[in-house]
């Protein structure tokens, strides 16, 4: 069980992969998976918005007792129509916060991000993670304070990885 307010990212990733959900990890979890020395409280994914994939995602969310995070805390289950749309569905689950993003700040969804992602295998689970260059680009565009603080860490990581290649 995750600590309050923090996602069990590894278990969420395993459950998503086991359920056959097509998704790309973005946000802070992507930074961590690339090796950035940061912490994150949630798992952000961009999921393929096909009816079949959303159906698999919705079934998993039901298993995880997912509900929409909102101020009124009505514990409303996620709606399939919202998961098919291009907006953000911010959820709480029994494994912690999971943000299902139809598209990112620049309008790119799963289809547009696949070519900017890489496959990572972690503890026998394989999934897609947005590549480091694209993650840096996205964090630059958001303009949020927490993203501006993360940028120097991501840029240093990219430089370190480039140096280790050459």
Image: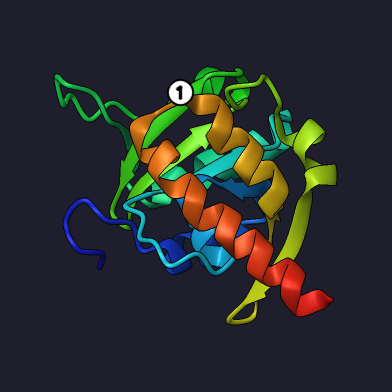
Seen at 61% across and 38% down, the residue is: 46
Q: Is residue 130 visible?
A: no
**Image quadrant occupied by the C terminus:** bottom right
As drawn, is 84 to the left or to the right of 87? right
Q: Secondary structure at mark 1?
A: loop
Q: Is residue 83 visible?
A: yes
Q: How many marks?
A: 1
126 versus 101 height, above or below: below
| Residue in front for this viewpoint, 36 or 165 | 165
As drawn, is 46 to the left or to the right of 119? left
**Image quadrant occupied by the N terminus:** bottom left
* Few, some or many residues within 10 Å of mark 1 (<14, 14–19, 20+): few
Report x, y in % for residue 91.
35, 37
| Residue in front for this viewpoint, 3 or 82 | 3
Q: Quadrant of residue 106?
A: top right
Report x, y in % for residue 127.
68, 61
Residue linked to disc 1: 79
40 versus 58 height, above or below: below
Q: Quadrant of residue 124?
A: bottom right
Report x, y in % for residue 83.
55, 26
41 versus 2 height, above or below: above
């Amino acid at each position: 069980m995750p600590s309050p307010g923090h996602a069990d990212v590894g278990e969420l990733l395993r459950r998503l992969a086991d359920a056959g959900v097509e998704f790309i990890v973005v946000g802070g979890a992507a930074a961590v998976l690339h090796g950035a020395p940061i912490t994150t409280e949630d798992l952000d994914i961009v999921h393929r918005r096909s009816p079949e994939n959303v159906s698999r995602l919705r079934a998993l969310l039901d298993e995880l007792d997912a509900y929409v995070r909102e101020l009124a805390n009505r514990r409303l289950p996620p709606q399939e129509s919202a998961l098919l749309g291009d907006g953000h569905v911010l959820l709480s689950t029994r494994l912690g916060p999971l943000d299902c993003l139809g598209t990112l700040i620049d309008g790119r969804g799963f289809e547009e991000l696949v070519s900017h992602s890489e496959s990572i295998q972690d503890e026998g689970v394989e999934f897609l993670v947005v590549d480091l260059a694209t993650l840096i680009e996205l964090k630059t565009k958001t303009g949020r304070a927490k993203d501006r603080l993360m940028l120097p860490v991501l840029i240093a990581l990219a430089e370190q990885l480039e140096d280790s290649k050459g």
